[in-house]
Image: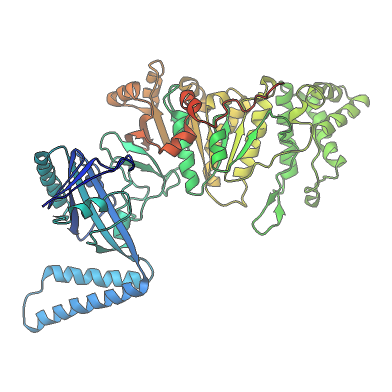
Amino acid sequence: MSSRLRRDHDSTAFTPDALSVGIRHLEVGGEWVASFAVVGFPREVHPGWLAPLLTYPGRLDVSVHVEPIDPATSATRLKKQLAKLEAGRRHTAAHGRLFDPQVEAATEDAYDLSSRVARGEGKLFRTGLYLTIHAASEEALADEVAAVRALCASLLLDAKPTTYRSLQGWVTTLPMGLDLIGMRRTFDTSALAAAFPFTSPDLPAPDPTSVAAPTGVLYGYNIGSQGLVHWDRFGEGMHNHNSVILGRSGAGKSYLAKLELLRNLYRGIEIAVIDPEDEYARLSAAVGGTYIHLGANGVRLNPFDLPIQTRADGRRSAPKDALIRRSLFLHTVIAVLIGTELHAAERAALDQAIAATYRSVGITDDARTWTRPSPTLRTLRDQLATAGKAGDRAAGDLAARLHPFVEGAFSSLFDGPSSIRPEGHLVVFSLRDLPDELKGIGTLLTLDSVWRRVSNPAIRRPRLVVVDEAWLLMKEKAGAEFLFRMAKASRKHWAGLTVATQDTADVLGSNLGKAVVANAATQVLLRQASQAIDEITRTFDLSAGERAFLLSADRGQGLLSAGTQRVAFQSIASPTEHQLVTSDPEFLASLPDVDASPEWEDLP
């Protein structure tokens, strides 16, 4: 008995050319498929118990349909089930028969489940598990069916073919959310969480004793087992939340960093990005992020701003030593601006001028004055110039050296109060268009803004700081020291640092770079250049097979290392994600509304 359906010319592209329906199988286009419903389950399951089905070497579609049961209905059904089980036990005892071990086990489980539901520790769900196997011919389908049923039997699963409902079984396993079979079993929260499919046999759960569904992001699929690689950097038991991504140019570092960023935004994690190459503009615009283009006209960060924070109750607060810390930071700012370390006389003159600068706008040691408008670099220059006219040669020399940054060619970054508010769920600082003379100070001001946000105790939420092309940042002393401080102290502030770089040798060749790598609990190694593989092998203690894999890995392939466990994976992205995270110039040129050079202006 079969029927044949053919598509019309105006149907969608994914509709098969022909569909032949049999008793226990379908012929879909040129493929043969058979579907099964799982009606028997083991008494106990462990996290990832569906992994053998997901890693089956053939093409096997696994569909899990879940429907929650309201608490009132759950309590009623449990009462009826307990009544049936107890009635059976008493009938057996009254007639002097031996107890059935399966009935005893079911009764104990029912009592335990009823107690947990009554205490609110779990809920009940109606769950259906369905399988569809694909093959190229009817003979191959018979072999695949036997193999899948044997695999299910080894997992204590009873898989029944959807006889006379083969079409409904196939539709049930399609990604349409339709359960046309309706053969379901009742699962509790723990059992359902253990069925969560995003697990990898090579990466342990952050808490191996927990049966709760893991959290985190999808990195890709396991190259060895074809399972999914799912990892949570903020999971319990992690030593820190830092990550490093190392790979040669074109290996997919930025692609993976942006993909992880986008998926962490789905989880509500606040993210700040330091982007030396201006690669995150499209992604920021798509998700409603704050994009700060340092070097653009009117974009300013005032280094004199005090770290005033607004708490959840609307009150404003600041650290007790905020003014002192800001004064010390300004010493670093001036040293970076003039390009040399300050000697004793200059430090003394600068310290007096900074105090006078704040007093000139009414800011004193009294915290009640800290909400007043902050001074600017021009005010400090004027104070130094006044002291220089009074005979302080060191102050006069500093005032002269600050002139280009106040009234000269480099004044655009400092010629007024801060014009931006680096706040939001995603903040991207673009440093590409900063002149070389302002790279150092622009980097320092950006890192200061990021650190002030991360270390704000009024914000209690997980945060990530992404530093792309970190080798450009580590060329600046202030940038290297910031990465070191973030790697050491970010965990105390519920934050994680992501460092992506292609200059592996330079990073591993410096003490600060090694400290950043050593303080990253999650390490991702993509394809490596042959010149750097020896240093990578020594640092990460790679095996001969892992070394060979990193030398020949395709784009997006790499090793995800977490402690002593490593897994080879291939990053994957949806078409929408790919459009947002790719930097392929050929692909971007094919997009209709992408302006490849937004900083250029049309001329008459």
The answer to which quarter of the image holds residue 73 is: bottom left
Residue 508 seen by the camera: no
50 is higher (above) or lower (below) than 496: below
Q: Position of residue 269 (x, y in %)?
A: 51, 47
Q: Position of residue 162 (x, y in %)?
A: 16, 55
- Residue drawn at x 71%, y 23% is 341
Snapshot colouring: rainbow
Question: Residue 471 or 328: which is nearer the viewer?
Answer: 471
364 is higher (above) or lower (below) than 505: below
In the rendered structure, the answer to whether residue 61 lies left or right of residue 211 reads left
Q: Position of residue 333 (x, y in %)?
A: 72, 30
72 is higher (above) or lower (below) than 399: below
436 is higher (above) or lower (below) than 188: above
Q: Position of residue 59 (x, y in %)?
A: 22, 40
In the rendered structure, the answer to whether residue 444 lies left or right of residue 506 reads right
- Residue drawn at x 25%, y 41% is 16
The answer to which quarter of the image holds residue 593 is: top right
Residue 271 seen by the camera: yes
